[in-house]
Image (cartoon, rainbow, N blue to C red):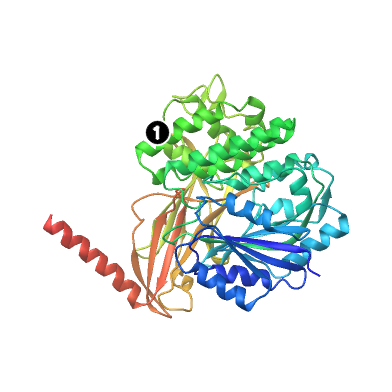
Amino acid sequence: MGKVCVIVIGYNDERHIRSAVLSALRQGPAVAEVLVVDDASTDGTATVLADLARQHSLVRVVRRAVNSGGCGTPRNDGLREATAPYVMFLDSDDELAPGAVDALLDAAVRHGVPVVGGACLRRELPEMRDTPWQYALYQRAAVHNSPAELPALVRDTLCVNKLYSRTFLSKHAVSFPEGAFRYEDFVFTARLLAASPRIALIPATVYLWHVRRSVAHPSISLARSGVDNWISRLEAHRRAVEVFERAGQKQMAHAARVKFLDHDLRMYVRELGTHDDSHRAEWWRHTREHLSSFNESDFRAAGAPARWLARVVTGADRPRDLARLIGLGNRPARLLPPYACVDGRPVWAANLPEVALDRIESEPLSRLPINIDAEPYIWGWPRILRVTVHEFYGRLAAADPKTLDIELRRRSDGRLGLTRSNVLKRRHGPDGASWTTQVVLNGLDTLAGQRTHRLEVWEVWARVRCADGSSLYTCVRATGAGLRRVVIPGRRHGVILIHPYATAGGSLSLRVAPGPAAAAVVVTRRLRRLMSRSRG
């Protein structure tokens, strides 16, 4: 007899909800019911669900008369309707991994715990690029008598990669915020952890989080074009911290604030370059206000990039030094010159002496936000990359950089497509010491895949090896006038389109598309630009 109710929520998602429900049905006899809450959809979702209910006796559909405006209310509806001992949550555009329910239920029964969490994969579609979510938490199986044993649990704010005892949730009044509340997972997770359950963690992948960035209506976590999304995230984080503080769990509240600095703040800072001045000004004002509730112990506990970012934002009344802020928010982080000192102490810059860059001397070289600039010249022969490794408060000079390895890795799967090595030469300039080299990139045509016209993205990474045995590995920053589309000859496809460009975080990547049609697209676009300029 099944013991788990899978609660699926959906709104106007006729394209994906069938796959979500089927992924739950394929879990086998452990599933007692697949309860689908349709949040008053106006497309063909109701028809799809009615068809599934006719075909599968385990499927039960609950249709709301009025759309709730969020995800919390339909999930709460599902909790009220469920009758099985355990519940799971599933979004209509995601899927449960094969064997997920069995793996979670087995751990719950074997260890006698009310909550079990499993690994989640963020899957970029259509590229099929998988990234583990909160990998460090799910590397190995573990049982914790309470969340206080592992405060890092606050970093996994997802509700969908876990199995819950329905009795435990009811007894401790653990539910989601109602109505049009974004990031409801934050508050639900805080309420759950504040109830101090015993928790088992398993390394098995249980949830496939589908990330579709090109759709007309992106999910809440991806719809970040407006500043209201950030304001909603701030409110959800504030509510989560309040839950811990009301429960007297100061350590968990502290951990939640540190998570905000390390994750949320950095993620949104690196996107500031894509927004206009009014957005940045409002974002800055709300962020400063939110950070005013943090204390120095929160800042000190965060990683170097995050605590430095927070101190810059709290130390300035308006957006400033955005290029450097965005670089520091990047992953991996970079801090652009200039590097200033006041009374021998590293500071953000001469115009912000109050923002100290602490613990530079004690941080491992590999964790410092070193900046490496790369300027591509691929339209001529040989095709080269001019690279400059910048000093960072004397740390690089002490390590004595010797060689540089350039790697081109395919974004979709991390596959290494091209690697080149060269010796670094030290030079002295107006901004202090730096190390330079010129890397030959002949062979770019080998990056083109088997399929004609298929576009692939290759990220450019650099590894600096030093005389003292240390090294650092980071993505390079795109600089110079070479960021333009180029068509080069290719052995397999005749011609190949290569477009070096800067990502939102400023890193250098290459778009590569093989075949004459790709070249034709470039030529057509250029002709249109020339014609529009001539008309102007």
Who is closer to the viewer here, 297 or 404?
Answer: 297
Which quadrant: the N terminus? bottom right
Q: How many marks?
A: 1
Who is closer to the viewer here, 215 or 129?
Answer: 215
**Residue at left offset 58%, top offset 71%:** 19
Furthest-front residue in view?
A: 65
Furthest-top residue in view?
A: 343
Rendered position, 141 above or below 321 = below
**Residue at left offset 75%, top offset 30%:** 248
Q: Secondary structure at mark 1?
A: helix
Any part of residue 370 in sight: no
Label 1 crowding class (10 Å Cα cut-off): few <14, some 14-19, many 20+? some
**Residue at left offset 45%, top offset 68%:** 444
Who is closer to the viewer here, 223 or 504?
Answer: 223
Rendered position, 88 above or below 250 = below
Q: Which residue is mark 1?
A: 281
**Residue 338 in the image, given as x and y percentages of width and height:** 46, 33
Side (left or right) of 84 relative to 40: right
**Residue 171 in the image, given as x and y percentages of width and height:** 77, 45
Rendered position, 420 above or below 19 = above
Who is closer to the viewer here, 212 or 424?
Answer: 212
Q: Amino acid at mark 1?
A: Ala
Side (left or right) of 225 relative to 415: left
Any part of residue 194 in sight: yes
Side (left or right) of 524 relative to 351: left
Rendered position, 80 above or below 61 = above
Give the quarter of the image for residue 237: top right
Which quadrant: the C terminus? bottom left
Furthest-left residue in view?
A: 535
**Residue 462 in the image, given as x and y percentages of width and height:** 54, 53
**Residue 519 in the image, given as x and y percentages of width and height:** 32, 72
